[in-house]
Amino acid sequence: MDLKNIVSFTDYFIICTGTSDRMLNALADAAVDDISKKHRRKGKKQGLARDGWVVVDFGDIVVHLFSPDQRDFYKLEELWKDGKVLLRLQ
């Protein structure tokens, strides 16, 4: 989601759903490892998979990893509806 002209703290959100704690942790770890290797950028991981929401902050990109229940509860896509969805995968 492109938020460049909407917020000052980041340019993009990536919003994903993981169906288990293991999946949420694996997605977060893979994002940190892959971006570190390919782009030499460090990400800061926050949150616990058991709580259903893990955030990885790369500065200009923030990755939100949700359990299905937490994604439905927080509805970031609705909260930031002025942002432009660049890609949606199901």
Image (cartoon, rainbow, N blue to C red):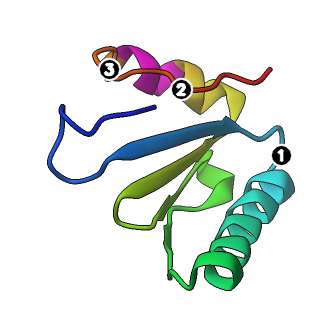
State the predominant SS element of the stretch in magenta: helix
* Disc number placed over residue 63 in the picture, else none: none
Q: Nearer the viewer, residue 63 or 46?
A: 63
Question: What amino acid does circle 3 point to?
Answer: Leu
The amino acid beneath tag 2 is: Leu
Tag 1, which secondary structure?
A: loop
Residue 33's spot in the image, x, y percent? 71, 78
For disc 2, the marked residue is 86
Q: Which residues are magenta?
A: 73-78
Name the mark on residue 20: 1
Q: Which residue is nearer to you in this view: 39 or 12?
A: 39
Q: Where, quadrant-wise, is the C terminus in this rendering?
A: top right
Looking at the image, is mark 2 or mark 1 earlier in the sequence?
Answer: 1
Percent across and percent down for residue 55 are 50, 57
Q: Which residue is mark 3?
A: 79
Picture quadrant where residue 6 is located: top left
Q: Residue at 32% x, 23% y: name it.
A: 80
Q: Is residue 35 magenta?
A: no
Q: Earlier in the sequence, mark 3 or mark 1?
A: 1
